[in-house]
Amino acid sequence: MKLRYQTAVTITAIALLIAGCSSSDPVEDEAPVEPHPLAGEVEQEAADDTEEETDDDHMEDDHMEAAETDDETGVLHMVAIAEMYSGDEERMGEVMFTQTEEGVEVHGRIETLDESLHGFHVHEFGECDPPDFESAGGHFNPGGHPHGAPDNPPDQRHAGDFGNLEFNEDGVAEFTFVDDVITLGAGKNDVAGKALIIHYEEDDLETQPTGDAGPRAGCGIIEASGTEDDANTDDDGQSEDAELTEDAEPTKEDAADGEELAEEDESPEN
Ligand code: CU
Ligand code: ZN
C-alpha cells in the first residue's frame, strides 16, 4: 500500500515536472526509477525453467567445464589461422585450427609444391623470416620428446609433428585432421603464436630431430582469432548454458560432420 502511494506521488510529481519544465528534465527524473518488484521473480522463474531443462545434461556440462580449465587442454572452440607464405613471399594458402573436445582440428589448403609428400610441422618460434624461415627454430617440442610420426604415443613425437601432407598433380594439398596432442589457447602444448612450416621434402618420421624433411618451403604464424562463439557469449552464463544444451543435442550439421569423421575415423561415437 505504501509503495502504491509513493508511486502515485511520483507520477504526480513527474506530471507536474512535464507540465512545468523543459523537455529534458523529465527524462533525468525517470532514469533512477527502480525496476518493477516483480521483475526479479520473473527472472528467477525463467532461471528455474532453464535449470530443469538442462538437468539431464549436467554430466556433460561438468565435463565441458573441466575441459576448459584443464591445463592439458586448450580453450574449447578457440580458433586460430595460419596464412602460409613461400620464401619469395607468395601466398601459398591458409590453415585453420579449432579446439574441439576431441583435440585440435587442423583444416586447410596449401598449394604450389610438387606432387609428393612434404613434411609439415609446428615449429617453436612464431617468426617466419623469408627466405629460409630458419627464424622459426626447431620443431615445437615442449615435452622434450624425440621426433616421430603424428600417430605415435605423445611421448614419442614432438607436439609439432604433423607428419606429411600429400600434394596432388596440381601441386595442391587439401586436408583435415584432428590432433589430440597439441592444444589451442591454453595447455603446455598450445600452438597459438607458433610457426607452421611446410617443407620441400618428405618427413621420414624417424631421423632425429627433423625427419630429414629438407629446407622450409613455406611458413605461417598460427594466430588466435578468438572463439567460434564469441559473437553470442554473454556475461550472465545463462546463454552459455543454453549453447551447451544446443551443442549436446544432435543437429543436422552434427550428423553431417559425423559422416565426414566416420570416413577418417571409425570411432563408434560417430
Ligand atoms: Cu618442420
Ligand atoms: Zn619433429
Image (cartoon, rainbow, N blue to C red):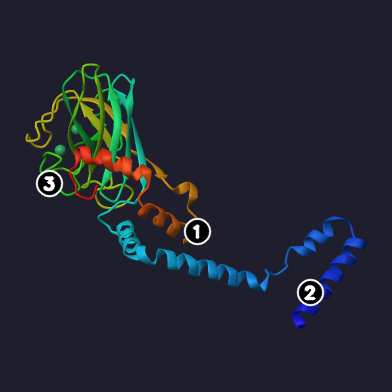
| Mark 1–mark 2 distance (CA, rounded to whole Å) | 33 Å
Kindly identify the amino acid type of the residue bearing the numbered disc 1: Asp
* Mark drawn on residue 266: none
Query: Which one is earlier in the sequence, the residue at label 2 or at label 3?
Result: 2
Q: Which residue is tagged 2? A: 7
| Mark 2–mark 3 distance (CA, rounded to whole Å) | 73 Å
State ligand 2's quadrant: top left
Kindly identify the amino acid type of the residue bearing the numbered disc 3: His
Query: Which one is earlier in the sequence, the residue at label 3 or at label 1?
Result: 3
Question: Compared with residue 261, is residue 10 higher up or lower down, i.e. above or below?
Answer: below
Query: Which one is earlier in the sequence, the residue at label 1 or at label 2?
Result: 2
Write the residue at 24% across / 18% down. 171
Q: Which residue is tagged 1? A: 235
* x then y, percent, for residue 131: 27, 22
The quarter of the displayed image where residue 1 is located: bottom right
Q: Determine if the C-beta at disc 3 is less than 8 A from ligand 2.
A: no
Image position of 153 (left or right of 229): left
Q: Which numbered disc, 3 or 1, marks the residue closer to the eye? A: 1
Q: Which residue is tagged 3? A: 145
In the image, 21 versus 49, the foreground residue is: 49
Q: Secondary structure at mark 2?
A: helix
